[in-house]
Image: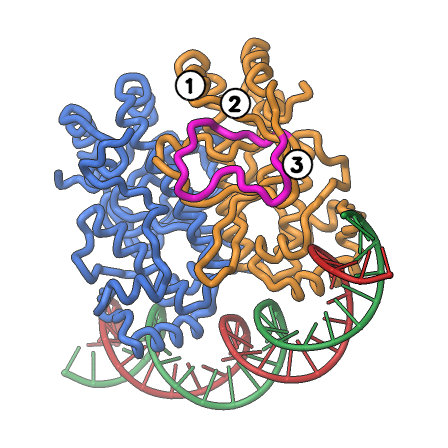
Chain colours: A blue, B orange, C red, D green
DNA sequence: CGCTGCCTTGACACGCCTCAACGAGCGTGG
DNA sequence: CCACGCTCGTTGAGGCGTGTCAAGGCAGCG
């Protein structure tokens, strides 16, 4: 129960007690990744699969001119490289600028799940398809939303995703990143992120202080950001459909 | 052999003659989708899986203010909605502004592949993971590249992808889209796309006339766009690794 | 022949970027 | 315990890339 992976997968598939026990067992041996350390780098062919258990990690890419684009945030319950074996090698890097707790799962374990636990495997595919949906959503924000709404949208997404795994309460969550990280996520300059943030705070939409984001009126922020969580495909627990 | 799906999957997995025959058979009954018709719309739970066989389609989303963001181009050999069953419902729309040829594959056929043709199924997952990689690449371009290089990068990608399935020659391909479509893809205004295009032509990098894009010097364009096709994960045919 | 859709051009406005400087907080070493 | 040097956040000034509005040209087609 205390396991963010299980808490998340429950939204994507029906898991039996046996399934949960298997997942619980897999996540037992966690290890700490220090700040500014990469978990996997571009070009690697990792043997083990990495899963974030606590803290934040991110997918990113650095261009020849030194610019960095962050392409995804990995929060507790998210896999880093579940399916690289199929692709061959990593086409981007995963790092943590803020330290995080992960587990390394041997590829053999995944193969075993594949053979004997189809329900779990389906849940894992659900998770990677949701990642893809999230990516599409980021692309839409990037292409069409102005800086303030883009940022607001990101905050809404993080709130919901963190709530799902029990790392956010109704209107706030811990957020250890810097404004520079957000700049590289939104494709903006640091200066502009700073000003946008002030504007959002001025409208009482987002309050970010002491590594914690607080949202005075969640509904208002969601309207402002035009946030619709459908792309996260969080089936209601108890939803009967396939 | 004449089948773009097979031509593409060959880059992602080793297929036996039997596998190819199965795929060949699946793609037999094509149908025509007229211009400006949607193939699947947001919220749908399609029974059949749709595969593009000829022409272009695209994934897109329309925001409340009417803006449209195109999130992917689907070219021959690309699936529209292979795995929606796992997600539940579509979180975006797929349409063709230009007409295309597709096949509808009954879900039962996919289930059958899943049970009896693991090699094919793995190849299909490879294709969806490549789609995800492409999405990440688009996000990087969107966030970090200026308009001209962004556009150049897109053209490089399309050249390579279309070559893969036999729909482009060494330095040109048919391209029926309008500048407005490109604008919605790159997140730019039509006017700016037009001016950027003129500039690229001025530098003799891209020549777009009569619904055909021609690239005078492919290598130069790739350098200009900082294009690295690794994210497409096109294993060399004959590559021995797993 | 006259639509209509698409491309093109010019003028102007604005969002966001860059450069540059300064301040606040914090860990470290003297 | 203070001084120092980080990193991070904040502010101002000016410039550029891109958007908007508006108008006209051209080709395709009924």
Q: Is residue B157 visible?
A: no
Instruction: Quote the CA–CA distance across marks 2 and 3.
Output: 33 Å
Judging from the image, mark 2 belongs to the subunit labelled: B
**Which mark is nearer the camera, 2 or 3?**
3
Depth check, front residue: C30 or B16? B16
Structural crowding at the residue carrying mark 3, measured as other residues with C-alpha within 10 Å and reported as few (<14), some (14–19) or many (≥20): many
Q: Earlier in the sequence, mark 2 or mark 1?
A: 1
Q: Secondary structure at mark 3?
A: strand
Give a yes or no on whether discs 1 and 3 share a subunit.
yes
Quote the CA–CA distance across marks 1 and 3. 26 Å
B105, A73: nearer the viewer:
B105
What residue is disc 2 on?
B241
Q: Is residue A169 magenta?
A: no
SS for tag 2?
Answer: loop
- Specify which label sits upstream in the sequence, 2 or 3: 3
Left or right: where B71 falls relative to A167: right
Residue at (78, 46) in percent of width and height = B214
Mark 1 and mark 3 lie on one chain; the one further toward the N terminus is 3
Please, which chain is the residue tagged with disc 3 on? B
Q: Which residues are magenta?
A: B32-53
Instruction: Check disc 3 and report the residue beneath it.
Output: B55
| Residue B108, numbered circle | 1
| Residue B189 image point, x, y percent | 61, 64
């Amino acid at each position: 129960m205390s396991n963010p992976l299980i808490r998340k997968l429950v939204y994507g598939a029906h898991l039996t007690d046996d399934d949960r026990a298997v997942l619980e067992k897999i996540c037992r041996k966690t290890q700490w990744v220090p700040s500014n350390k990469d978990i996997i780098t571009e070009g690697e062919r990792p043997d083990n699969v990495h899963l974030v258990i606590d803290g934040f990690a991110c997918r990113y890419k650095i261009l020849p001119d030194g610019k960095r684009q962050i392409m995804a945030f990995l929060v507790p319950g998210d896999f880093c490289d579940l399916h690289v074996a199929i692709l061959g090698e990593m086409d981007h890097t995963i790092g943590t600028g803020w330290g995080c707790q992960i587990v390394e799962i041997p590829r053999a374990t995944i193969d075993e799940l594949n053979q004997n636990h189809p329900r779990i495997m389906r849940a894992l595919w659900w998770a990677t398809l949701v990642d893809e949906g999230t990516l599409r959503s980021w692309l839409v924000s990037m292409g069409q939303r102005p800086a303030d709404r883009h940022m607001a949208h990101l905050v809404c997404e993080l709130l919901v995703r963190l709530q799902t795994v029990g790392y956010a309460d109704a209107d706030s969550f811990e957020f250890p990143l810097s404004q520079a990280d957000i700049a590289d996520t939104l494709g903006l300059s640091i200066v502009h992120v700073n000003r946008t943030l002030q504007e959002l705070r001025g409208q009482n939409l987002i309050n970010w202080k002491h590594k914690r984001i607080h949202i005075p009126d969640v509904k208002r922020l969601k309207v402002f950001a035009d946030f619709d969580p459908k792309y996260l495909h969080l089936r209601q627990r108890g939803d009967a459909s396939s």
